Image (cartoon, grey):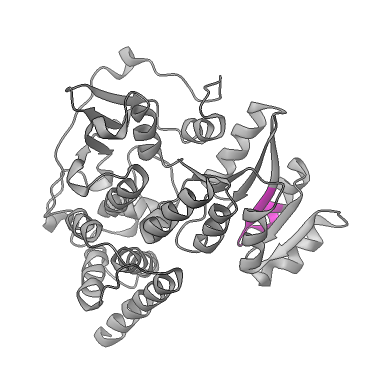
Amino acid sequence: MTKRIAILGSTGSIGKNALRVIEALGADYKVTALTAHNNVELLAEQVRKFKPKIAAVTNPEKLDTFKKLLGKTEIEIHSGNKGLLAAASDKDVDVVIAAIVGAAGLEAILAAAKAGKILAIANKEPLVIAGALLTKTAKETGAKILPVDSEHSAVFQAMQSGNAKEVNRIILTASGGPFRGATKEQIQNATIEQALAHPTWNMGKKITIDSATMMNKALEIIEAKWLFDVPVEKIEVLVHPESIIHSMVEFVDGSVIAQMSGPDMCLPIQYALTFPHRVKGITKHLRLEEIGKLTFERPDMEVFKALKIGYEVARTGGTAAAVFNAANEAAVKEFLEGKIKFVNIVELIERCLDRHDVKTNATLEDLILADKWARNEVKGCLSKTT
């Protein structure tokens, strides 16, 4: 039976890899909807090649350019947030790959969950911001949430060796980023170029900066809590610079099940699409004798304070995670524009959390308002210091 797939964010790194995977999987996998924000040139190429039913441009200012590039077509063309909603909830879509960086795709992902879709979630934000709401909705509608994020895909794969009650620990691995082993003083004035020089993964700028601050692991702790329904105390982080073991699960009998593969996002994307089956794919196979050894270290939570804050936010719940994520997005943007120092990213996040009144049992509206408040708070903090 053909799986019909919508890709939210098809022109980004995950989206492009997803299309490579789908093409290699063959006729049993069909692209039904594609969306992009600014890169309408690439979107037009993708649409011509894969011939989806729906194409959406979320930046309305780019819509006319996209239409001109595409020319005469029978494809449904949508714009703005409505375009995302149309792609995510269309009756002819079975699987929604969520690959939009940041909070922008949250409403569409919740709509897909309400429609009972299979959600292949690559970006952390939906489960970080709205984990309680999203998992509750999925349970009510029968929607399946399958992780594409490499660490959570690894945990999900390892979990097939037991059940949730038998889990003793979830161990999320981290590359350590470009500042592994650095002191507070050494990263105080890190440049944009230094922060973007990731030693292992080739990713977008925002997530690469998150790796440098280890904010990505902080967000993954919150994500894992909701995905696997485990208390925060059972989630640990280990630095593993080779990026071969993507994460591990320790069971109550002492067995540790690890998922290993090269640093290539095609494998977790494919596993989400073919689950519960495994098929031959385009990922290069490991040669362990070439790797030689694997190393592990505990992260320094005083140097990488985002991790420590992440645990606190995961325990707090409510709107705290929405503020945590939004403040980070806003601060990273300021850093990439050269307006703040690297060290200021986490300082701004902490300041926002200190000033926020957490609302528990948050609705979608509460979460969106908290997100907006945090972004404005970052701007407000910066305007007072300039």
Is residue 341 left or right of 18 when viewed as pictured? left
Residue 112 position in % (x across, y down): 57, 54
Name the one closer to the observer, 273 or 190: 273
Which residue is situated farthest in the right direction here? Answer: 72
Q: Quadrant of the N terminus?
A: top right
Which residue is situated farthest in the top direction here? Answer: 289
Is residue 125 visible to the viewer in this orientation of the structure?
Answer: yes
Question: Quadrant location of residue 380?
Answer: bottom left
Is residue 205 visible to the viewer in this orientation of the structure?
Answer: no
Is residue 73 left or right of 61 when viewed as pictured? right
Question: Quadrant location of residue 161?
Answer: top left
Which residue is situated farthest in the front direction here? Answer: 140
Is residue 322 left or right of 134 when viewed as pictured? left
Residue 298 position in % (x across, y down): 14, 39
Name the one closer to the observer, 362 or 96: 362
Q: Residue at x 28, y 85 (%)?
A: 386
Is residue 156 left or right of 109 when viewed as pictured? left
Residue 289 position in % (x across, y down): 31, 12
Residue 200 position in % (x across, y down): 35, 37
Question: Quadrant location of residue 29?
Answer: top right
Q: Residue at x 18, y 53 (%)?
A: 304
Q: Residue at x 34, y 26 (%)?
A: 259
State how many labels appear.
0
Name the one closer to the observer, 314 or 281: 314
Q: Is residue 152 magenta?
A: no
Q: Which residues are magenta?
A: 33-43
Q: Is residue 179 above or below residue 20?
A: below
